[in-house]
Amino acid sequence: MDDIEAELKIDSPGNETTNQEIIKNPLHIEAPSKYYETGFHRSSRKCLKVIRDAMLHHNWQKAAEYFTSYIQTLEDTTVTSAHLTRDVIWRLGAEILHHLANASIDDFNAVYEIMKHAGVSNYAKICLEHAFHLLLNGQSDEAKRQLSSASHWRYGKLTDAQSLEMKLIHAYCGFLDYFIWSNKISTTPETEDVSSLQEISMYFRQASVTLQEIITRPGIWDPFVLSYITMLEHNNSLDEALKVLQNYAYNKDFPSNPNAHVYLYQFLKRHNAPQSALISSLRILHSAVPSHKLMLEFCSLLLKKHQDTALKEALCACMDLLEFSSWKCDRDAWKCLLKILQRPKNEHNMVKEEWAVRRSLWMAFHFRPYIIKTESQKDVRLWRIKERVLKLLGEDLHIEDTRKSPSGQRDRHHNASEDNVDGDSRRGPARNSNSSFKRDESKAAREGNAAGLRDRLTDFTHRKRPINTLNSTGQLVPVGFIPDV
Amino acid sequence: MFHSKCCFWTTSAAGDQEEDGYSEPCAQCAAVDWGVSNEGQFFCKNCYNVTEKMREVTDEFTLYIKNSRISRIAKPMKTEKKCAREWMVCEGFQVVLKCQADALVSLGVCLQFKTEVLWNFWTRYLQNTRQAFVSNPISTVDQNSESESETESVVCSEYSFWNGAPSEAGEVKDSGSSTGGRSGSLDALSYSHRVDRKTYNVMTMPRTLALCYLALLWVREAITLADLLRLVKERHVPYLNIHDNFPEDMKLFGRDSLIFRVDSIPSYSTVHKEAVDLAQVMKLPAFPMVSQDCLLHPIPLTVRYLLESNLPDGLLVWVHKVIDEASMGDDSFLTFDPVKQKPALVCYDIQAAAVIIVTMKLLFKLDDRVEWTSSGKAASEKKKKVFNVERWYKVMQPAFERARQKMEREEARQLWKSHKPFITSLKDKSLVFKKRRVVNHLQHRFQKLTDSTPEQQCFTTTAFSSFHFHWGKEQGSDGPSLHQHRLHCTFKKKGVKRLTNRKYWHTVLSVCPPTCSNHFSEIEASLPRMYVWLLDLFSFLLGVSQAQVHKEVLNVERCLMERELLSVSKETPSPKKRTKKPRKI
């Protein structure tokens, strides 16, 4: 019924909507000064502005009313990028529907269905969103149906242009197969019914084939990998699962993904792998995300090894961990550090060296007078541990004395690092006075030197929400997206 | 009369609009694009190959014009039940004009407007542009073959249809769609492609309004141009999506959309300019006098705008004085005469508003100081019914703001697209219909969710009122009426009545060369806010820009100035004038 040629001409893959293009040619909301504007365009522009304002004020009823009038821009004959208009209508419509109290699931389905076919240049994307919406509403069967029909969609060149979305549709198809399979496995008890067993195995086959294929492509496939591993474990093919996880973690073609190492470690731990394997997997994770919560486990694993090098590694890992503000007041981490320091075989030199490097940062970060004061009042147990740690590190205990920093204990190396924190080595003798200490902090925060930078960056992790954090080399790495399966 | 002449095509039916001509492919170039020569033989318009085939032409309308030829033939398809017929672009405009005239008559304009004036104007226009009703009309059909354009001529009121055996209708259709430049009307291509549209003075959609306006002016109806444009905007006069009103058998297609599709309502200045141009093209004689009994005269018009803007009736006396002083009440000044060297068509409505503004400036100075302090004085006298500017502003401003917001809302929600979409080419046909379907579905969905009706329906269901505001104590009025308030702006000194406000300010009055654009945007920031607000108010009421009102205010001030200089040279100053003497601040 639809004229494919005409559609193709207009929606040639060359003008696929990208964010870049939207940035380059935004829909205008302010009046153009340079060129003549037709009445129709003026109406649309004003309408869009009202819709935007209404949406920003969460006045969804008003937004919907104006959106009803805005729909006519689809029929605009002068807009060169008709797909942009369709994109806007789709996004606005979906957003408004989400917030309308009286919108039923039928409305959603109808609107998605209409928009899917209005301009097929966005077909795959809208299909995916439709499926997600159905999943959110608990209609997984319907979502599965949508996705499998979408995966068979063919529209000449346009299908190729949306290959990424088609791949995702394929992947989610497999994922939903797995979902249905795991539901069936958990709900139906062990039956001898052949037909149900057949059905289960069919879902299993479909899901495993799709997932196996999808996770060999470079990318971040966390939920898909997890579900595939679950299936393989269910099938007792542990070697295969290990291979998959190792490929996912170590393959250079894949983007750096800390979760891959986490999954590998968890798998190894589940299946009682030797300590050395566990440690080596965590060591890589440590280099990628020193603030990961598995680092405590890493330390305890290292402590079991009773080697000097392992002890040093544990000390470094633990101190690294404590340098992140999200771990700053964690009692377990401090306990771990205390345990390391209390080791009888503890080489005095090793701790001294490590402490010398970190002292300036730690004194400012953990043992500032204000912090000590508040902690000694609020969290006494933590403060006790910290106190003991400080003692083991050879620093003075008393609050009064921490204000007057013991200058006699410093070596040259130490002074250099202190200067670094100061950012001003010319100040000379006044450096060690109480006032200079305070100035140090403010300066450090202002000038972005080691302590300040670390502090500010660790604020990210402190907020719990963010997915990105810095690894030791200063690169941004995604962390913590562990979906619930 | 108009009816009897223009209905001829509505009653007759024939032809097909998309596939025309003798449908055998040409032996030489295989194109299907036939014309008929003077001898009645078919010739291929592509390669000028003349066939043996002869056509007998039936011509119903040779009674009207002797020297006429048929340039194309139409052949209805056997399968098609609905009869579509051939038509020319100017016929289309005739339909547009007829619809607009009908709407205006139903709104209360005298019938004479439609039956005599507009029809005469229209025939006059066609004659003067040599499109029809002349012995040697310009062909608008053939552009490809220059040799034919002289011998062949087409008159809009003539067409021929002819029922022949259809053959290979499908092929015709295909070739028609591939050429791309097809249209429902016969001459849309040449109409829209004409390089020198100006010299040919082809009809355009804004010009239909200009023509209506001229006709309204001729019959001295009380509809100003601003009113006409508002009627158009609120859809009481058809203009948007005019093709909905076309008769069934006139199919619009392809290039017709370039001519008849409307995506803006023309501005006041555009239509005004077009009206002056058209009057010259039509070589119209001087228009009927605009005298005091005509509602376009500034005195009745100012009454209307005073009522609208809730100003006291007492102001009218002063308005009259200004009109007299500026000698703007003269018939010769107000009457439009296209025969003159430089014909000037007075913008009656803007001028009336400008007169009111000048009067306000005269009485209250409007320099952001005097009008507030003098109104304070009036209030302190504790006479309840004394007009004061501050109170007026307080009543007016919220109502104005409401009206403006309402206008914005209506503009944002205005529907522009018709239920009957334009089809620009056969290839796009399905796509256009699909878009229409999508829009319909979506609108239906969201309307159900919001229980809202589109603005278009609101417009047409509400009755038209030429007033934006209603003042009085009734329910739904915009505020209390100040019409009965007394003006208190004179005092007596030595037996001579003088204005309390002794000074008058104005901007530079020297006339700019015509190439100069208006300077309003440059000086806007330096003008008193009260004056700008007043400009704002009247420009909103009239639907024009502030700059236009300001320009008209300057015109009125210039008229006053000229009279002043004249009277000074004659040395007969009246005592009244002294108080009015414009002084620059």
Image (cartoon, grey):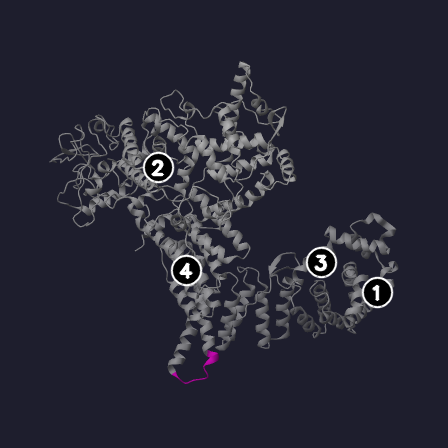
Q: SS at mark 3?
A: helix
**Furthest-front residue in view?**
B495
Q: Which residue is mark 3?
A: A455
Distance (Cα) linking label 2 and label 4: 35 Å
Q: Quadrant of the N terminus of chain B?
A: top left
Q: SS at mark 4?
A: helix
Chain letter of the residue beneath label 2 in the structure image:
B
Do discs 2 and 1 belong to a common subunit?
no
Do discs 2 and 3 belong to a common subunit?
no
Say which of A247 and B332 sits in front: B332
Q: Quadrant of residue A404?
A: bottom right
Distance (Cα) linking label 1 and label 4: 74 Å
Instruction: Using the image, tell me which numbered label, if any, was put on residue B205.
Output: 2
Q: Quadrant of residue A173?
A: bottom left
Distance (Cα) linking label 3 and label 1: 22 Å
> Of the residues tagged 2 and 1, which is closer to the observer?
2
Label 3 neighbour load within 10 Å: few <14, some 14-19, many 20+: many
Distance (Cα) linking label 2 and label 3: 69 Å
- B162 displayed left or right of A434: left
Q: Which residue is mark 4?
A: B448
Residue extent of the magenta highlight:
A185-193
Lower position in the chain sequence, tag 2 or tag 4: 2
Q: Position of residue A344 (x, y in %)?
A: 79, 74
Say which of A37 and B298 sits in front: B298
